[in-house]
Amino acid sequence: MSFQVIRPLILTKLQAISDIQFATDSHTSKLTGFPAATFEPSGNENSFFTNAENQRRYTFDIVVHQEMSVLGRDEAIRVLGEVCDAIITAFDEDYRLSNNVDFCLALPSAWGEYKSGSASIKYAMLTLTCVKTAIVIT
């Protein structure tokens, strides 16, 4: 298991959510639709698990972007909430990523705002951690 195996699985899952208009596996300012979801690896851990296994954690930051300039703040927050709920549900329902990981942890989020050109963007960053046990001694 590796970042390179997990990344396309996450992208496929995000692209399957009908409310998301644009999804990519890298953070970019070139968003072609809203709400948009971008993500990248953000870290990993490798811990002793048993005398023959390590437990590896692969972490990804998924950022959901929603413009506020056209929709307005209240509507952007409502849309962002719906999309975050859909992402959380998608990973809850397939917490093993089609049997490619042992499990994914529940997704916490943090919300904020930024400016992109003349547009105001509301965002939520969800942290996805995928856990896989690796046999290190045979």
Image (cartoon, grey):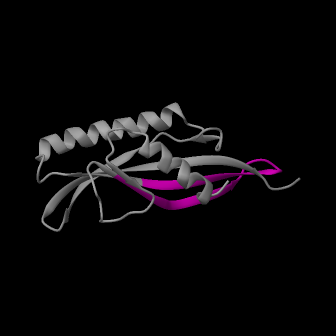
Query: Do we see residue 13 in this rendering?
Result: yes
- Residue at image location 38% in from the left, 63% down from the top: 27
Q: Residue 71 appears at what percent x and percent y?
A: 13, 46
**Residue 118: quadrant of the picture:** bottom left
Q: Residue 134 placed where, x, y %? A: 74, 51
Whether residue 100 sits left or right of residue 59 in the image: it is: right
Q: Position of residue 18 (x, y in %)?
A: 35, 38
Residue drawn 82% across and 50% down? 51
Tell me: 95 left or right of 39. Answer: right
- 61 left or right, relative to 3: left
Residue 80 sits in quarter: top left
Is the stretch drawn in magenta largely helix, strand or loop? strand
First to last magenta residue range: 37-61
Residue pushed farthest right?
138
Question: In this view, which residue lies farthest toward the bottom?
Answer: 117
Residue at 55% from the left image edge and 42% from the top image edge? 104
Residue 63 appears in view:
no
